[in-house]
């Protein structure tokens, strides 16, 4: 691990080579973060079972420093959306996402979380969690095998490696904005959509009359 | 046997109620049509005089062309035997049916579901609220004239989605490009959501209790919410608990957070297309779900699978049972506070069984292996040897290991013995099924009571325990694993060579009009599929009697008077899977 970390662009005296590593702050920072991504203990559906299997002895998530699953969003870095996102559940998911401290990542596990999956046409199904929260990694599969989830997590590590302390959003001056929590009305209401809903309301009624 | 005595002593329904009860004479249908107002009387008679003490399934069917809504009841005798099917027909414009909660408490959640999804009102129901959708949702989605936002056509397979060489996605046609629609008079601004006001109404009231020191002591009842995101709720399930100190006064389960419209999608799908969806009901036991659904459709089609396929089916179903019970025991320990380590022990062997599933079906969890009249493909080479090794070596050792570690463990006994007791008469009344019912001393197992497939030829005992507490519900799962191993030994010994599919495998099966109720003893309890066909390629009605869902009916009863920490253990001992609770 230190091989990848050490990047001596300045000369290091011969006798100190074993003791001193010179690198960039970004690398140390990202190395620490990528090796301790704590997922939120949060299972939605079938994919959660494969997530548990990934954490269990055969696939052993601990190899990646990710075995510490936290039930509280305040202590977790990664939200693995493992299963079908329903309209009844999305307010809670958005709220959990808002409660996670930065830096935070979202991994959409499986077809349902990525785009609705086999249940997309359902009246209570949100076609993809990315309609509401930003997703960093999509893992296809129904459900993805533990290997696929591990691959997704390694992709996330690659993404973390590419980030720089100078440009990440959580060190910017402006406060990070939270996502407005959807409301359960006659159907799911996204507060960001209210102007659209208003604009579409008259257009919808003739269709209703036709049907 | 008392069953025979009863049927000779008591008059059959149509004789006793010549006016109100008529046999259902539609082709392919069975049972009786009961006059709406006579239903409670008929149900009481069926329960008390005819011995149909176990109301298994309540559901509705929307017969749009006839303008009728029908409510279908399936009742059984816990002594065994076939179903008594009662039907009530009401006009679909304003369907009102008398509630049976007073006679069969197991109707509680199922009637709420029928109200929620089909808009059937049950007069006299004590708590007729929506159960899977939220209060305030617009419409009753399982009615045939309800169209979802992403509605494309009445039936699948849909026409080509690449009309002019250009792919289109269904959301492009939706007005808001999202899966939402609003009633025409709806204004989003200033909308006040109903929230959980109805749920919390009447909970957590201040009560005055007499203090010991002469002064009146005011105590608050606290309302505690567990879930839907909570590590001990086994998924997105929510419990609203009213506490007085640590003691539970009232408990209400709230579900629907994983309601993914299984039945509505199932009614658009062709019959075969539903097979992979059944995998995702109780996603720990995909093979068992396949089994139930194939049985229901095979009943309609009037075919039976060849001998080898029957053996393969039973083998898969029993392996599934073992896997499920190992999982349930491991996560019960999780719920008792022994976080994850015991679960690691318990699910170690599960991976090996999943390897078998992957070898035969191509997928670890979502097997989609059964077909109408057989199974999708024969066992690959070497699988039988692997199963033999598992059944004779690994799995018995694992069961003994769990038995040694857990059964006499002091903490487990302290946490489980005498907690969440459910007496046998309550267990029957609430429609509990599977290990929960049998741990209460009711030896009711569909494999024995109403044998399907080759279970009548196999030698096994129905596991039963008598205390009905969390401890017995744990230990009965060990018993059942041992019985499953016994069955598997016989299956491995006797499995014949031959075909695995009746007739030619086909994508579009021809299913004659009629109704069928296929049920299997799934690891969680009686899993039933009620399928109505009108002769077209798609089922007219497709309903799942989900054991996890109905087992929750007694949750409140089991928890009252217990401590708040016991709720988690009791929930773990029922062993629910949310995919099946919410469907």
Image (spheres, coloured by chain):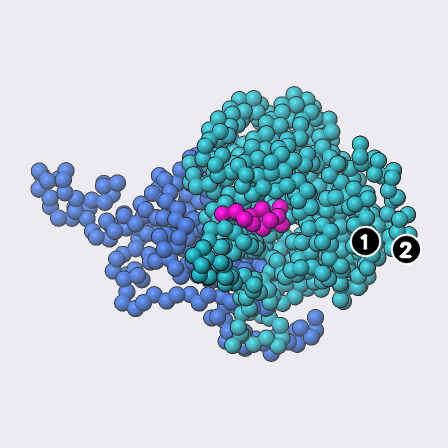
Chain colours: A blue, B cyan
User: Residue B93 versus residue B332: which sits nearer the camera?
Assistant: B332
Tell me if residue B259 can be seen. yes
User: Residue B343 versus residue A5: which sits nearer the camera?
Assistant: B343
Q: Cα distance, mark 2 to mark 1?
A: 13 Å
What residue sits 52% from the left and 55% below the top? Answer: B241
Q: Position of residue A63 (x, y in %)?
A: 35, 39
* Dot 2 or dot 1, earlier in sequence: 2
A201, above or below B376, in the image: below
Mark 2 is surrounded, within 10 Å at the Cα level, by few (under 14), some (14 to 19) or many (20 or more) other residues, namely few
User: Residue A109 versus residue B286: which sits nearer the camera?
Assistant: B286
Return the residue found at the far front: B214
Q: Position of residue B574 (x, y in %)?
A: 57, 43
Q: Position of residue A188 (x, y in %)?
A: 55, 66
What residue sits 75% from the left and 66% below the top? Answer: B94
Residue B246 among magenta residues: no
The circle drawn on residue B512 is none
B541 lies left or right of B353: right
The circle drawn on residue B41 is 1
Region of the chain picked out in magenta, as a range: B551-563
User: Residue B18 versus residue A65: which sits nearer the camera?
Assistant: B18
Q: Element under label 2?
A: loop
Q: Which residue is mark 2?
A: B19
B95, above or below B334, in the image: below
Mark 2 vs mark 1: same chain? Answer: yes
């Amino acid at each position: 691990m230190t091989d990848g970390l050490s990047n001596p662009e300045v000369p290091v005296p011969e006798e100190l080579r074993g003791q001193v590593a010179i690198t960039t702050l970004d690398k140390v920072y990202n190395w620490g973060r990528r090796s301790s991504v704590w997922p939120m203990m949060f299972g939605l559906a079938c994919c959660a079972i494969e997530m548990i299997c990934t954490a269990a002895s055969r696939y052993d998530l601990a190899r990646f420093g990710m075995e510490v699953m936290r039930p509280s969003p305040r202590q977790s870095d990664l939200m693995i959306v493992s299963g079908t996102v329903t309209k009844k559940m999305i307010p809670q998911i958005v709220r959990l996402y808002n409660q996670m401290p930065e830096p935070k990542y979202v991994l959409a596990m499986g077809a349902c979380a990525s785009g609705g999956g086999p249940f997309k046409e359902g009246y209570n199904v949100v076609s993809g969690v990315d309609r509401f929260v930003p997703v960093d990694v999509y893992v296809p599969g129904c459900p993805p095998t533990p290997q696929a989830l591990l691959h997704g997590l390694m992709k996330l590590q690659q993404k973390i490696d590419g980030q720089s302390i100078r440009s990440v959003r959580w060190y910017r001056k402006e406060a990070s904005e939270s996502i407005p929590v959807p409301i359960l009305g006659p159907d799911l209401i996204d507060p960001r959509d209210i102007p659209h809903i208003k604009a579409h309301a008259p257009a919808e009624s003739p269709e209703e009359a036709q049907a | 046997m008392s069953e025979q005595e009863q049927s000779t002593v008591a008059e059959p329904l149509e004789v006793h109620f010549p006016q109100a009860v008529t046999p259902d004479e539609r082709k392919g249908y069975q049972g009786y049509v009961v006059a709406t107002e006579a239903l409670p009387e008929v149900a009481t008679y069926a329960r008390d005089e005819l011995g149909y003490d176990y109301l298994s399934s309540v559901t509705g069917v929307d017969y749009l062309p006839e303008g009728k809504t029908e409510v279908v009841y399936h009742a059984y005798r816990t002594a065994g035997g076939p179903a008594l099917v009662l039907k009530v027909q009401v006009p679909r414009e304003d369907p009102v049916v008398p509630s049976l909660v007073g006679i069969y408490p197991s109707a509680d959640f199922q009637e709420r579901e029928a109200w929620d999804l089909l808009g059937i009102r049950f007069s006299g129901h004590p708590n007729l609220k929506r159960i899977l959708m939220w209060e305030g949702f617009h419409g009753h989605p399982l009615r045939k004239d309800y169209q979802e936002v992403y509605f494309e056509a009445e039936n699948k397979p849909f026409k080509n989605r690449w009309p002019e060489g250009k792919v289109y996605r269904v959301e492009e046609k939706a007005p808001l490009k999202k899966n939402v629609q609003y009633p025409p008079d709806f204004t989003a601004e200033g909308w006040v959501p109903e929230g959980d006001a109805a749920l919390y109404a009447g909970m957590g009231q201040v009560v005055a209790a007499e203090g010991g020191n002469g002064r009146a002591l005011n105590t608050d009842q606290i309302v505690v919410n567990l879930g839907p995101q909570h590590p001990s709720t086994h998924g997105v399930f929510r419990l609203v608990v009213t506490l007085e100190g640590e003691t539970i006064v009232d408990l209400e389960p709230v579900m629907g957070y994983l309601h993914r419209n299984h039945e509505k999608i199932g009614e658009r799908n062709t019959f075969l297309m539903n097979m992979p969806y059944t995998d995702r009901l109780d996603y720990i036991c995909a093979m068992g779900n396949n089994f139930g659904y194939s049985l229901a459709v095979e009943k309609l089609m009037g075919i039976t699978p060849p001998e080898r396929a029957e053996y393969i089916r039973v083998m898969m179903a029993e392996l599934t049972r073992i896997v499920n019970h190992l999982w349930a025991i491991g996560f019960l320990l999780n719920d008792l506070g022994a976080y994850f380590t015991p679960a690691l022990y318990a699910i170690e062997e599960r991976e090996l069984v999943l390897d078998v599933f992957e070898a035969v079906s191509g997928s670890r969890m979502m097997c989609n292996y059964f077909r109408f009249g057989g199974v999708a493909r024969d066992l690959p080479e070497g699988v039988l040897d692997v199963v033999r090794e598992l059944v004779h070596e690994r799995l018995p050792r694992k069961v003994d290991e769990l038995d040694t570690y857990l059964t006499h463990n002091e903490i487990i006994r302290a946490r489980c013995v005498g907690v969440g007791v459910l007496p046998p008469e309550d267990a029957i009344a609430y429609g509990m099924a599977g290990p929960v019912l049998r741990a209460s001393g009711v030896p009711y197992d569909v494999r024995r009571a109403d044998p399907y497939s080759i279970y009548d030829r196999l030698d096994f005992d129905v596991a039963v325990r008598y205390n009905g507490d969390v401890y017995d519900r744990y230990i009965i799962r060990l018993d059942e694993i041992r019985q499953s191993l016994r069955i598997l030994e016989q299956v491995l010994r006797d499995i014949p060579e031959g075909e695995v599919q009746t007739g030619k495998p086909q994508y579009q099966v021809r299913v004659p009009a009629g109704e069928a109720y296929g049920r299997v003893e799934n690891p969680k309890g009686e899993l039933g599929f009620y399928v109505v066909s009108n002769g077209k390629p798609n089922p007219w009605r497709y309903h799942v009697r989900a054991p996890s869902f109905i087992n929750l009916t007694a949750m409140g009863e089991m928890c009252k008077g217990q401590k708040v920490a016991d709720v988690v253990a009791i929930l773990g001992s029922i062993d629910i899977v949310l995919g099946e609770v919410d469907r």
